[in-house]
Image (spheres, rainbow, N blue to C red):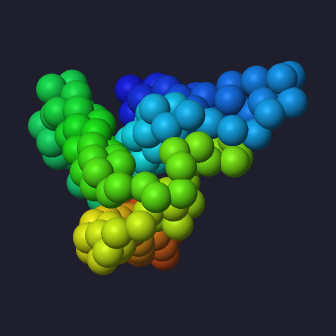
């Protein structure tokens, strides 16, 4: 659990660090523009960190499910190797999703210049600057990502419903040895 919390906190720090430095620089230099390369880097990092965080939250839901609903199997299912593999899979999934979005978005030719007049670069803002009909390609990628994230959401909800059911079930049953009276004789 602490390994996942460390990974989650690193993702949180990284995600806020993608936009705050540029916004602070814009305030100090009284500008609102971001370069094309800066925009691509910001989109990649933000999508990578947010997606990896969401996948990591899914892994953490599974970890809590195993810990509460399968406590006797926890040490075999969630050993240190499995935790590292799951966290690496979450980070790799975020990386691949960000690479797909960034490559797809920034391969579209722009006809209204390559400077976005705000400190935070978003995919819809870039699509507004495009002059081609590649919009449907990006919408397809967005739909695919939405389906992936919805699948994670369903997994998280099902995991926590199982956890709550197990906790409520354990709360209504009396302890097996509570009805017995123990007598100690010397």
Q: Quadrant of the N terminus?
A: top left
Q: Position of residue 121 (x, y in %)?
A: 57, 47
Q: Position of residue 170 (x, y in %)?
A: 42, 67
Q: Residue at x 23, y 33 (%)?
A: 88
Q: Does residue 77 appear to the left or right of 146 in the view shown? A: left
Image: 130 above or below 186: below
Image: 115 above or below 177: above
Corner quadrant of residue 112: bottom right
Please state which of residues 96 and 185 is positioned toward the viewer in this rendering.
96
Q: Residue at x 38, y 26 (%)?
A: 3
Please state which of residues 181 and 39 is positioned toward the viewer in this rendering.
39
Q: Position of residue 105 (x, y in %)?
A: 35, 55
Whether residue 177 can be seen here = no
Please state which of residues 46 and 148 is positioned toward the viewer in this rendering.
46
Corner quadrant of residue 142: bottom left
Corner quadrant of residue 70: bottom left
Please give the count of numbered marks on the rendered protein: 0
Q: Does residue 185 appear to the left or right of 115 in the view shown? A: left
Q: Residue at x 13, y 37 (%)?
A: 76
Whether residue 40 can be seen here = yes
Q: Quadrant of the C terminus?
A: top left
Q: Residue at x 52, y 45 (%)?
A: 114
Image: 178 above or below 24: below
Q: Position of residue 65 (x, y in %)?
A: 33, 56
């Amino acid at each position: 659990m602490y390994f996942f919390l460390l990974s989650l906190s690193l993702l949180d720090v990284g995600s806020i660090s993608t936009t705050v430095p540029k916004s602070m620089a814009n305030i100090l230099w009284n500008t609102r523009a971001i370069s094309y390369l800066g925009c691509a880097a910001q989109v990649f990092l933000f999508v990578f960190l947010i997606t990896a965080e969401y996948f990591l939250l899914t892994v953490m839901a599974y970890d809590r499910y195993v810990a509460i609903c399968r406590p006797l199997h926890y040490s075999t299912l969630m050993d240190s190797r499995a935790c590292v593999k799951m966290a690496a899979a979450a980070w790799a999934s975020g990386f691949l999703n960000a690479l797909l979005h960034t490559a797809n978005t920034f391969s579209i030719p722009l006809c209204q210049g390559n400077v976005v007049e705000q400190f935070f670069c978003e995919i819809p803002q870039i699509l507004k600057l495009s002059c081609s009909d590649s919009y449907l390609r990006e919408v397809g990628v967005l739909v695919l990502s939405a389906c992936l994230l919805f699948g994670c959401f369903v997994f998280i909800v099902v995991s926590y419903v199982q956890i709550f059911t197990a906790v409520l079930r354990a709360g209504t049953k009396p302890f097996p040895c509570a009805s017995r009276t123990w007598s100690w004789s010397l």
